[in-house]
Image (cartoon, grey):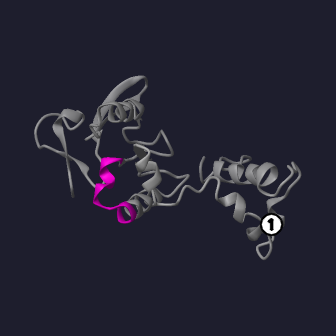
C-alpha cells in the first residue's frame, strides 16, 4: 500500500503527498488542488520555508547535548515511506559533526525487515521509550533493545536491535528464533 495500491485506490505515498499539498504546503487549504498542476519552475521555492519544519536534518546537536538531551532513533531497514539510508546518513553526519562522544547522547537502532515504524517481516514490536527513560535517569546508554515478531497474536521470533553500526549475529547455538542466542557485533 505504501508504493503500489490495489486497483481503484491510491498508494499511501500519493495520499500523503496530495493531502500535504492540498491542505498545508501552499498556504490556505484547497481541497480541489490537483497535484498535476505543480509548477516545477515556481512551486519548489514556495516550499523552502515550510521544508524546515519536518526536515530535522541539522546534524549539529551541540545545544541538545549541552542541555542534557538523549536521542534514541530507530528505523526499519524495509521502510517504504522513508529510505532507511536516510537515518544512517543522519546518524553518521551527527557523529562527524559532534565527535566521538556522540554515542554518549545519541543512538540509532536499525530494525531488519521492519516497515515504516512497524510492520514488515522483521521483529517490529519493541519498546524504545523505556530504554530512553532509563538512559536519561541512570546515564546508562542502551546496548540493545529487545524486539519481537508477532504473528496471529503470538510471539514467533525475538531479536536484539543493536546500536548502529552493530548488527545481531547468531551465536551458532540454540534456537535462531530467540534473542538470547544473538549478540550485537560490528560487521
Q: Looking at the figure, which quarter contains the C terminus?
A: bottom left
Q: Nearer the viewer, residue 126 or 47?
A: 47
* Image spot of residue 89 (x, y percent): 42, 62
In the figure, 100 relative to 104: above or below? below
- Residue 99 part of the magenta segment: yes
Residue located 32% across and 62% down the image: 99
In the figure, 177 relative to 116: above or below? above
Residue located 62% across and 53% down the image: 54
User: In the shown orientation, is residue 167 left or right of residue 121?
Assistant: left
* Image spot of residue 112 (x, y percent): 36, 48
Q: Considering the numbered disc 1 on the image, is that residue within a helix, a strand or a loop?
A: loop
- Residue 40 part of the magenta segment: no
Other-residue count near label 1 (Cα within 10 Å), few / some / many at <14 / 14–19 / ≥20: few
Q: Nearer the viewer, residue 132 or 187?
A: 132
User: In the shown orientation, is residue 59 left or right of residue 39?
Assistant: left
Q: Main secondary structure of the magenta part?
A: helix
* Image spot of residue 137 (x, y percent): 34, 30
Residue located 28% across and 45% down the image: 162
Hey, which quadrant is residue 46 in on the image?
A: bottom right
Hey, which quadrant is residue 179 in on the image?
A: top left
Hey, which quadrant is residue 93 in on the image?
A: bottom left
Q: How many marks?
A: 1
Residue located 40% across and 35% down the image: 128
Q: Residue furthest left?
A: 173
Magenta segment range?
95-105
What residue is shown with label 1? Answer: 38
Q: Residue furthest bottom?
A: 41
In the figure, 138 relative to 107: above or below? above
User: In the shown orientation, is residue 18 left or right of residue 85?
Assistant: right
Q: Residue furthest front?
A: 66
Amino acid at each position: 500500500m505504501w508504493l503500489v495500491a490495489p486497483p481503484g485506490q491510491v498508494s499511501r505515498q500519493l495520499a500523503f503527498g496530495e493531502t500535504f499539498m492540498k491542505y498545508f504546503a501552499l498556504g490556505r487549504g484547497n481541497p480541489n488542488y490537483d497535484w498535476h498542476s505543480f509548477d516545477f519552475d515556481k512551486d519548489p521555492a514556495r516550499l523552502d520555508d515550510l521544508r524546515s519544519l519536518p526536515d530535522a536534518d541539522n546534524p549539529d546537536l551541540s545545544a541538545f547535548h549541552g542541555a542534557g538531551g538523549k536521542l534514541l532513533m530507530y528505523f526499519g531497514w524495509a521502510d517504504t515511506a522513508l529510505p532507511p539510508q536516510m537515518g544512517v546518513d543522519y546518524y553518521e553526519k551527527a557523529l562527524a559533526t559532534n565527535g566521538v562522544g556522540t554515542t554518549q547522547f545519541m543512538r540509532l537502532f536499525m530494525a531488519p525487515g521492519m516497515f515504516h515504524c512497524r510492520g514488515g517481516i522483521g521483529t517490529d514490536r519493541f519498546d524504545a521509550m523505556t530504554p530512553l527513560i532509563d538512559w536519561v535517569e541512570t546515564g546508562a546508554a542502551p546496548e540493545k533493545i529487545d524486539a519481537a515478531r508477532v504473528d496471529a497474536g503470538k510471539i514467533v521470533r525475538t531479536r536484539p536491535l543493536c546500536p548502529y553500526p552493530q548488527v545481531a549475529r547468531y551465536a551458532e547455538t540454540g534456537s535462531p528464533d530467540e534473542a538470547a542466542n544473538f549478540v550485537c557485533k560490528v560487521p
